[in-house]
Amino acid sequence: MRVGLIASTAGHLAVLLWGVISFPDAKPFDIGPVDTLPVDLVPVSELTRLRIGEKTAEVREVEATRPTEKPVEEPKAEEKPAQTEAKRPNQAVPEPTPAPAPEPTPAPERPTPEPPAPQPEPPAPQPEPPAPRAEPEPAPAPTPEPEKKVAETPPPPTVRPRSKPTPPPQPRREQPRENFNPNEIAALLNKVEPAGGSSSNSTQPASLGSRLGQSGVTMSQSEIDALRGQISRCWNPPAGAAGAGDLTVKLKFSLTIGGEIDSEPSVINSSSNPTFGIAAESARRAVLRCAPYSLPAAKYDAWRDVEIEFDPRELLGG
Amino acid sequence: MNPVELAQTTLAAPQGDMSFFALFLQAHLVVKLVMLGLVLASIWCWAIIVDKWLLFTRTKRQMNRFETVFWSGQSLEELYRTLSGRANHSMAALFIAAMREWKRSHEGARPAIASLRQRIDRVMDVTIAREAERLEARLLVLATVGSAAPFIGLFGTVWGIMTSFQAIAASKNTNLAVVAPGIAEALLATALGLLAAIPAVIAYNKLSADAGKLSARMEGFADEFSAILSRQIDERS
């Protein structure tokens, strides 16, 4: 046994010695020089100031507005064939060549139950198609066209029966067939869903912004907090009320530009907590008691109607 | 001082003393005890391993030598006379025990031969048990260290990590430089535990297999020898 013990101790000492010699210190990692990063502080309100638009729209360049006198007519001439072609397959009858002239106005009315009006007209405009072309629709050209496509799809069932008995359409039809371009089938198909009521008056895609479009006026976070602070100073939450968690009271009220209460604050939420009524009443009292609030008058639009939440936990804690 | 230099000096500061001894010295007392215990266990394990290894090789050599002498056709009486003078182990001890019983039974006026074979078997069984015990002594220490040392090391590690988290709480600083030394010293305990356990487990498996082989060889010899003796007994009676 002694031999083993001596050998073992000697071996351990040797290993320890070797460890001390060959692993004296941990090697530090090499750290490359770190570049400094420029940091800009941006107020939140800059990001939250939203304009009307679609939240999902892309950010894109918008062309500056141009005078719309001459250029309007040229696109009309180009679009006309497409327009008439689009019409033919849908509504066989009413449009002879004059189509462009009467259309802009009757188009939206077509679904309404007085189609006879356009019907008698066709014979008259027929002889003089070239004249009305230039005259009657100078300005509205680009805007009404998408409208028509939208409005025309629903009527076909109502219009067709009326149109069929009349013979004139037949010769009419042949003409467009010559013009029919199979490559443009896609253009003939109407992919727009029928929209009720009037359509938007812009053909441009929606811009990025909020749907409500608060006309560019927003309260910054600090101003909202200022109002909150002014109200909470006057608020005595029901101390010791059981289950302070359910006692969040939401009040809605409107203010005059001078900061006075315009409409009586109303509670817009509810809770099963028996003390909720007391809490709501205390919140209402707080709003009324601190009545003249000092808020930036320039942003009156943003704080005319206020919805504010009273959370006892926040106020008790802070 | 520019930020780069600052970063480098703060990072360089704690790595000054991360050697084994420094890690050991700055460890908590409990961790120190754990480490010391593990080092002692490792020393003890290796002592047993060396000792057993020497014993087994010696025993194997003795067995070989005895078997060549035994099967050389030499008279058993003579062999008994030469061997009985010294301290014997393994097969020689078996042979001496059986021969002593044989001789004792034939001494005197009335030889007790009737149950001599059973007595010889009994004597040889006892000798085999004694020899096997000698071979396997302290092997259990290896098994114990092999299974317990990792846990002991883990205990040291947990304790060290606990103290280093307490250090974080006390200094209110979660910088890695605050935690790293504590965790490094804690991990040293696990490393020592594994260092003690791995050789112990391997050696235990190897040595216990060897001991089993040796005692099986002794049993085989005992059977053969008892067959020879019983033939002698039957011939004489």
Image: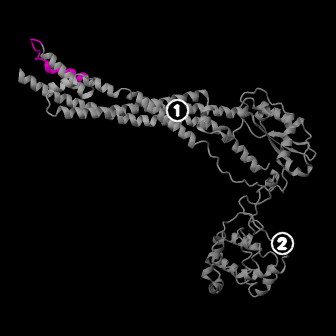
Within the magenta stretch, is there residue B200? no
Q: In this rendering, which labeled residue sits more in front, label 1 or label 2?
A: 1
In front here: A36 or B5? B5
Task: Please tell me whether mark 2 sits on a helix, a strand or a loop.
Answer: loop
Left or right: A63 with respect to B93? right
Pinpoint the chain carrying mark 1: B
Q: Is residue A136 above or below residue A285?
A: below
The image position of residue B83, as x and y in percent, is 22, 25
Q: In this view, does B237 lie above or below A297?
A: above
The image position of residue B124, as x and y in percent, is 21, 23
The image position of residue B115, as x and y in percent, is 13, 18
The Cα–Cα distance between marks 1 and 2, rounded to whole angstroms, is 79 Å
Q: Badge 1 is on which residue?
A: B153
Q: Residue at x 68, y 40 (%)?
A: B14
Q: Residue at x 73, y 31 (%)?
A: A244
Residue most extreme to the top: B109
Left or right: A307 with respect to A80? right
Q: The C terminus of chain B lies in which quarter of the figure? A: top left
Q: Is residue B213 visible?
A: no
Q: In this view, does A292 lie above or below A80?
A: above
Residue most extreme to the right: A258
The crowding category of the residue bearing disc 2, from other C-alpha atoms within 10 Å (few below 14, some 14 to 19, many at least 20), is few
Amino acid type shown at disc 2: Thr
What segment carries the magenta color?
B108-126
Amino acid type shown at disc 1: Gly
The image position of residue A97, as x and y in percent, is 71, 84
In front here: B78 or B168? B78
In front here: A280 or A27? A27
